[in-house]
């Protein structure tokens, strides 16, 4: 009797473990998958995730539901992903702010390294150095010389305190020894307008259609790109790192699952996403918003997040940057 009871208990324990979402799910997916976007509908994050949702759903055999949950500097949506069952049916679509927010705001209540399972990068877009047309500089070196010659230094804009543009320009200021004063704006549109009117002289920002349009019109001048290698979407544009060794600043977007999601489930999602991001139509859609469709392995993505977290933590410690 005792041996029979022990065997039944063992079988029950095995069955419970097999049912746990932390173990392999051979039939994954067998219901719709939800992707939480912690930003409003209509933005760049929303555009990209909707561009991949339909083809990704077809490959996985289940519909993809896009759930926009903006607020609290993307914290509401991000925490919702962290609190979801680790079964692969709730994912999060994030960008660099996912790493920066908890570094500048301790009330964010999540750790980007420990609380999530990376699936893959989805796109990258290197920042660009642009100046108002009144600035007498034609490349990065001549801009640095011009800025150093200004008695009061030079003002730069960003889309807000602790935004990626703010962080990237503060890093550039440190790397070059320039005296640069930060002027935060409430979003991309007023920031871009301030540069076009000369209210600020320089931005390190994404190569958005608005910025690149102003460059074509001659209102702004593009001096360099902050990629670690030549940027396919900006052919012929010189890298800032040619003048400022090691300087890179690239916006990325990517997909995460909650911590504890089975590796087999993550691998299934990753394999499907790699195929979607390699599709010419996906690449074309992303290129229309100056983003390059790009995938990685989960391990590569995890390493990138760890390195970025350390990089921005070091900058914040040196500059004292805090969220508004």
Image (cartoon, rainbow, N blue to C red):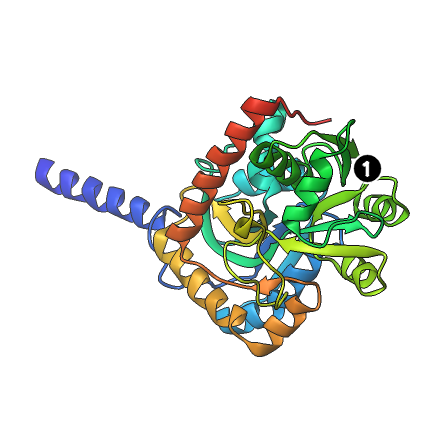
Image spot of residue 120 (x, y percent): 47, 56
Image spot of residue 180 (x, y percent): 71, 31
Could you tell me which residue is drawn at 68 percent across and 41 percent down? 145
Residue highlighted by disc 1: 185
> Which quadrant holds residue 125?
bottom right
In the image, residue 212 above or below residue 39 = below
Could you tell me which residue is drawn at 76 percent across and 34 percent down? 154
Q: Secondary structure at mark 1?
A: loop
Q: Quadrant of the C terminus?
A: top right
**Left or right of 64 in this view: 314:** left
Image spot of residue 22 (x, y percent): 36, 46
**Left or right of 23 in this view: 253:** right
Q: Nearer the viewer, residue 320 or 199?
A: 199
Could you tell me which residue is drawn at 70 percent across and 57 percent down? 207
Local crowd size for mark 1, using a 10 Å CA cut-off: few (<14), some (14–19), many (≥20) = some
In the image, residue 309 above or below residue 54 = above
């Amino acid at each position: 009797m005792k041996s029979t009871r022990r065997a039944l208990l063992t079988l029950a324990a095995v069955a419970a473990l097999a049912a746990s979402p932390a173990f392999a799910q051979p039939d994954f997916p067998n219901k719709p998958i939800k992707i939480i976007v912690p930003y409003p509908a209509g933005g760049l994050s929303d555009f990209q995730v909707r561009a991949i949702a339909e083809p990704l759903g077809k490959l996985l055999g289940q519909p993809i539901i896009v759930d926009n949950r903006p607020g609290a500097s993307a914290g509401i949506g991000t925490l919702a992903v962290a609190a979801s069952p680790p079964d692969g049916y709730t994912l999060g679509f994030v960008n660099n702010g996912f790493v920066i927010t908890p570094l500048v705001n301790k009330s964010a209540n999540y750790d980007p390294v420990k609380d999530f399972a990376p699936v893959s990068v989805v796109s990258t877009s290197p920042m660009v150095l642009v100046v108002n047309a009144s600035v007498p500089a034609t490349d990065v070196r001549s801009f640095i010389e011009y800025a150093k010659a200004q008695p009061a230094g030079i003002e730069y804009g960003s889309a807000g305190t602790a935004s990626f543009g703010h962080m990237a320009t503060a890093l550039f200021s440190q790397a070059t020894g320039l005296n640069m004063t930060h002027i935060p704006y409430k979003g991309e549109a007023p920031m871009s307008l301030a540069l076009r009117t000369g209210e600020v002289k320089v931005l390190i920002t994404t190569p958005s259609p608005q910025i690149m349009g102003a460059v074509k019109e001659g209102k702004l001048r593009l001096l360099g790109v902050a990629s670690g290698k030549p940027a396919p979407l900006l052919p012929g544009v010189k890298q800032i790192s040619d003048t400022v060794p090691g300087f890179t600043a690239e916006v990325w977007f990517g997909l995460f699952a909650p911590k504890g999601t089975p590796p087999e489930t993550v691998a299934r999602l990753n394999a499907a996403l790699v195929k979607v991001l390699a599709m010419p139509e996906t690449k074309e859609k992303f290129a229309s918003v100056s983003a390059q469709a790009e995938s990685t392995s989960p391990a590569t993505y995890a390493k990138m997040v760890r390195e970025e977290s350390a990089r921005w933590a070091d900058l914040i410690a040196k500059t004292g940057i805090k969220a508004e």
